[in-house]
Image: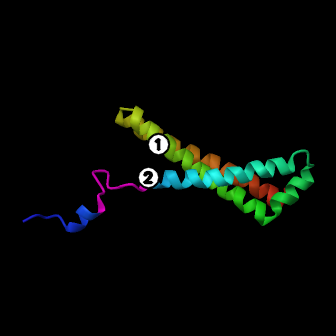
Amino acid sequence: MAMRTPLKNVRYLGSAKEGADHFWKQRVTGVANLFLGIFLIALIVKLAGADHATVKATIANPLYGLPLLLLALSAAIHMRLGMQVIIEDYIHGEGLKIVLLMLNTFFAIAVGAASIFAVLKLSFGG
């Protein structure tokens, strides 16, 4: 008698127990970055040549500030996922791989936090 449930066969999780979760996160953040990146380019074109007060007032508007925050978050997640794949594929030493994966996560958090801080600082003044 087998000790496995039929649910294992349905989920197709594989040996890593993650399935396609990483794949879908990378694709969803990629599509989000596409639309949010187009928004960013349009915003840059709109604000080209504007003074600091105009830029602050524009980003303080939630219709502009929130998409910028979403872009910072989505881009940081997408960057982390992409580098994780590269590290897992090309680094063969387990110790070095773990250290680089941890540094990758810390770096993505730092970049995301700095980006979010910059948008919030422009939005709320400072």
Q: Is residue 51 left or right of residue 104?
A: right
Residue 16 part of the magenta segment? yes
Tally the marks. Answer: 2
Binning the other alpha carbons within 10 Å of mark 2 as few (below 14), some (14 to 19) or many (20 upward) gives: few
In depth, the one of 105 and 20 nearer the eye is 20
- For label 1, the residue is 84
Q: Residue at x 81, y 58 (%)?
A: 59
Between marks 1 and 2, how big is the CA–CA gap?
Answer: 10 Å
Tag 1 near tag 2, CB within 8 Å: yes
Residue shown at 81% from the left, 55% from the top: 122
Quarter the C terminus occupies: bottom right
Closest to the camera, between mark 1 and mark 2, is: 2
Residue 22: mark in rendering: 2
- In the rendered view, does 108 fall on the left or right side of 93? right
Q: Give the extent of the magenta segment.
A: 11-21
For image coordinates 55% across by 49% down, the residue present is 78
Q: Which mark is residue 126?
A: none
Q: Is residue 63 left or right of residue 89?
A: right
Question: Which element type, helix, strand or loop, lies under badge 1?
Answer: helix
Q: Amino acid at mark 1?
A: Gln
Secondary structure of residue under mark 2: helix
Q: Amino acid at mark 2?
A: His
Please identify the quadrant where the N terminus is shown: bottom left
Magenta stretch prevailing secondary structure = loop
